[in-house]
Amino acid sequence: MFTKSILILFLVLISSFPGFGAQYWPTLVWKKSSPQSLDFDPKSIKKMFQFIQKKQFPIDSVVIVKNGYLIGEFYAGDMNENSLSNIYSVTKSFTSALVGIAIDKGYIKNEKQTLGSILTKNLTIKKDPRLNKIQLQHLLTMTSGLKTRDNFLSNWSGIKKLKNSKNWVDFIISLGTEKKSGEQFNYSNSGSHLLAAIVTENTETALEKFAERHLFSHIGIKNYKWQKDPQGINHGYSNLKLSARDMAKLGILYINGGRWGEKQVISSSWVKKSLKTHSYPNKGQFNPLKFYGFNGYGYQWWNSETVWKADLIYRKAWGMGKNSKKYPEYFFALGYQGQYIFILPQLDMVVVFKSRFKKSRDNIIPKALIEEFLLN
């Protein structure tokens, strides 16, 4: 029974409202605007929030930003704009941003560098030709070939073993490979943790300190918590805690090509590479309903063009499924239980969800809501 109190903030027109296409940077303060002042139908947002309530979906927070302005917010129970919670695998997209910044600043040459040249402290890599040839881009695109087996297809068994190990990086490397790097997509949480280790080793700076100096401080993220492994390396794959509004800031940064105000925080080329499809999650997977409901994967970002046919089967069970239109490509960071940062370039819109879905298939309900209500 959904008993949590709901706070829905429909934002009213401010005295000097922005024109369509206007942009400001919510570094310290968020400005609010009505949807209609930015040429967006407010009924779409209202209907989506009402539908969430009606269906009693375990969605705690929704933040909708257009042209940089807050045009809608939804909070459940004791959640509010300052609440920190685990964003799970959305952490990966933040880690990817830090990899890009490390490359921009010359700490790492490029994403074609091999593990042997960027994790030089690990002797096992040098002894194994396959490990040595894994490139940074293979970790970014989930095509490393590492034998990690730490996703939902293996019931997270690899994650449990990783957490019980005394040295996470050594444990991941000790698993070796099961496929040649660059050949096939295999979602790897451990691979994303290696990205954090790579940035830490090559910048000689703790990942969270590097983030504070080169990312968080520029876009106004001050309050966060980020777990570390036994060696003090922040988890590259998960366990960063942020507010929904601060999650939206990464989306705003990326929808503006890595620029925040007058500063280019991340190179536009890295943003483009990150959102571009580099690997295909369902390629080579024999499953009529497909394992992943998304078309492609970039540098720790997902992308999609439209609903997939099997998705409509589930949407009917959720009381949706009427909208099967095709849309221009859009992008998102995705985390366990339905954490999302959506980037909708065609609307200049960023939408954040924080959720607590228990069934893995229900994790894509926020994506269905986006397509059914906001993109309809």
Image (cartoon, rainbow, N blue to C red):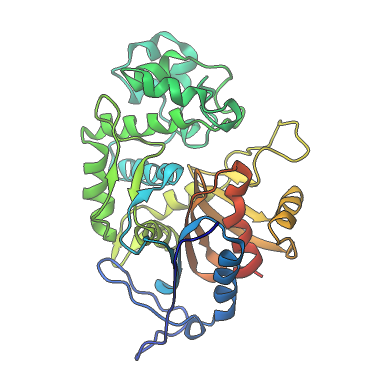
* Lateral position of residue 185 relative to residue 90, left or right: right
The correct choice, above or below, for 118 with respect to 73 in the image is above
To which quarter of the image does residue 115 belong? top left
User: How far across and down, in percent of the image, does residue 279 sit?
Assistant: 59, 38
To which quarter of the image does residue 10 belong? bottom left
Residue nearest the viewer, comparing 31 with 312: 312
The correct choice, above or below, for 6 with respect to 141 in the image is below
Which quadrant is the C terminus positioned in?
Answer: bottom right
User: How far across and down, in percent of the image, does residue 135 sit?
Assistant: 46, 28
The residue drawn where x is 36% and y is 50% is 85
* Lateral position of residue 286 relative to residue 348, left or right: right
To which quarter of the image does residue 315 belong? bottom right
The correct choice, above or below, for 215 with respect to 133 in the image is below
Task: Single out the residue that lies furthest toward the bottom.
Answer: 15
* Lateral position of residue 20 relative to residue 31, left or right: right
Task: Single out the residue that lies furthest toward the top.
Answer: 127
The residue drawn where x is 47% and y is 20% is 133
| Residue 47 visible to the viewer | yes
Residue nearest the viewer, comparing 305 with 72: 72
| Residue 41 visible to the viewer | no
User: How far across and down, in percent of the image, does residue 340 sit?
Assistant: 49, 53
The residue drawn where x is 63% and y is 39% is 280
User: How far across and down, in percent of the image, does residue 93 sit?
Assistant: 43, 46
Which quadrant is the N terminus positioned in?
Answer: bottom right
* Lateral position of residue 156 relative to residue 208, left or right: right
Report how many numbered discs are placed on residues in the image: 0
